[in-house]
Amino acid sequence: MTDLKLAIFGSTGSIGTQALEILSNSGNLFQISALSANNNYQLLAGQANLFKPDVLILANTEHRNKFEKILSYKPKEIIYGNDGLDNFALKGEYDVLLNSLVGFSGFMSTYNALIRHKKVALANKESLVVGGEIISALPAFKEGKLIPVDSEHSAMLQCLAGENLKDIQKIIITASGGPFKDYTAQQLKNVKVEDALNHPNWDMGAKITIDSSTMMNKGLEIIEAKWLFNIPVSKIEPVVHPQSIIHSIIEFVDGSSKAQLGPPDMKVPILYALTYPERINYPNPTLDYTQAMNLDFRPVDFDLFPCIRLAIDAAGEGGFQPAILNAANEIAVDRFLKREIRYIDIPEIIESSLHNIHSDKEITPHALQTIDRETRAFANTLLK
Ligand code: MN
């Protein structure tokens, strides 16, 4: 058994379950020191009984009794409530944090882990979208302690191995285009929750699947790339690549480009982030290039998908704009999933929030939390 301790935040989500699946198949990469869930206490207990971490974190306290009854061992500590994650990130025992929390609520955990110079495998893109200015200024970030799990950014990191950031001419970030890439504006008006949750290539959680369908996901990823690789958004070019086999391309100043290819399976970038800079065996079938296949590219339709334009503009303006964009989007997606608003209302709510919320404070974790709270409250009142 290795001595390297891994904490997984959001272990019952899509990334968390896939990470544990890899770890159970690839021997003793890590000792799991902590697992966390928001609501799904049954799955958390199942994972805990298998991996026996010292610490379990369950945000929803309601399930306390039922949860402890189905545990087959006695962990050293069970932490309940919403502050558990941030506190564990700040004080708990781990060498690597896989942060697969969804939304801005994952920011403080990334921040706290980096403050302690821990390695962070980052699946919580909002940490950088909202707090990129703060995160990228931390010494641990400059030491390379933050490794992206997002497949596009994993591709960029892999293409940049052995390169200098100053030699990047542009980054071509690929997008599947989501389930509505061939829709008309008229058809988009009638999109139902079920349609939007049905992604052609990737198996992901509900929030990111909706973001992928509106192309907000690509917008957020452009902001994520901006901070990760210290590159202006004007040099990041989104392109629709429906097969999701090329995960991104870096073009260098001398006219040469490098792309990273792989099956559309999140286990590949999860594995890379966990073992970086080393590589270990991938247990599943890989792509078979001897079979006829096409790799297609087409431009992004910014008129049909206004969310990606809103994100690019917010990133260009900087300041609190990305934080407002993200908070408004989180609320809009949540309200769409609850069937309170129509699909095409999502960009309306975001745009209205960007116009109405302002702050001239200095960007600090506290100021980000304040603007996040204000934006959520505002976005919740729209179209009522
Ligand atoms: Mn991605």
Image (spheres, rainbow, N blue to C red):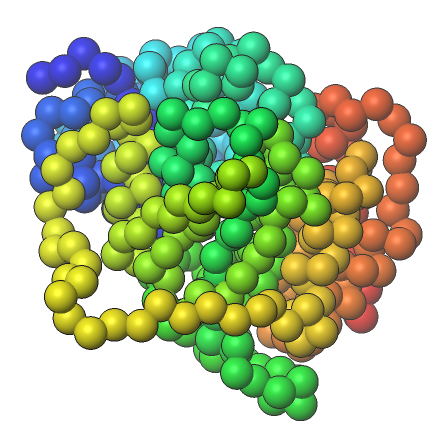
Residue 286 found in image quarter: bottom left
Asked whether residue 68 appears in the rendered view, the answer is yes
Say how many tags the image has.
Answer: 0
Q: Residue furthest front?
A: 254
User: Quadrant of the rendered structure where residue 281 is?
Assistant: top left
Up-down relation of residue 196 to residue 252 (above or below): below
Residue at left 9%, top 17%? 1
* Image spot of residue 294 (x, y percent): 31, 72
Q: Residue at x 71, y 60 (%)?
A: 309
Regarding residue 90, the answer to whether it shows in the image is no
Which quadrant of the view contains residue 186? bottom right
Q: Percent from the top left, x then y, of residue 77?
A: 32, 18
The answer to whether 192 is drawn above or below residue 66 in the figure is below
Residue 177 on image: x %, y %: 50, 69
* Vertical position of residue 339 compared to residue 318: above or below: below
Q: Residue at x 18, y 62 (%)?
A: 289
As drawn, is 311 to the left or to the right of 268?
right
Q: Position of residue 101 (x, y in %)?
A: 46, 40
Q: Residue at x 52, y 71 (%)?
A: 298
Q: In which quadrant of the rendered image does the C terminus lie?
A: bottom right
Classify residue 279 as left or right of residue 172: left
- Residue extending farthest to the bottom is 186
- Decide if residue 254 is on the left or right side of residue 136: left
Q: Nearer the viewer, residue 145 or 289?
A: 289
Tell which of 299 and 251 is nearer to you. Answer: 251
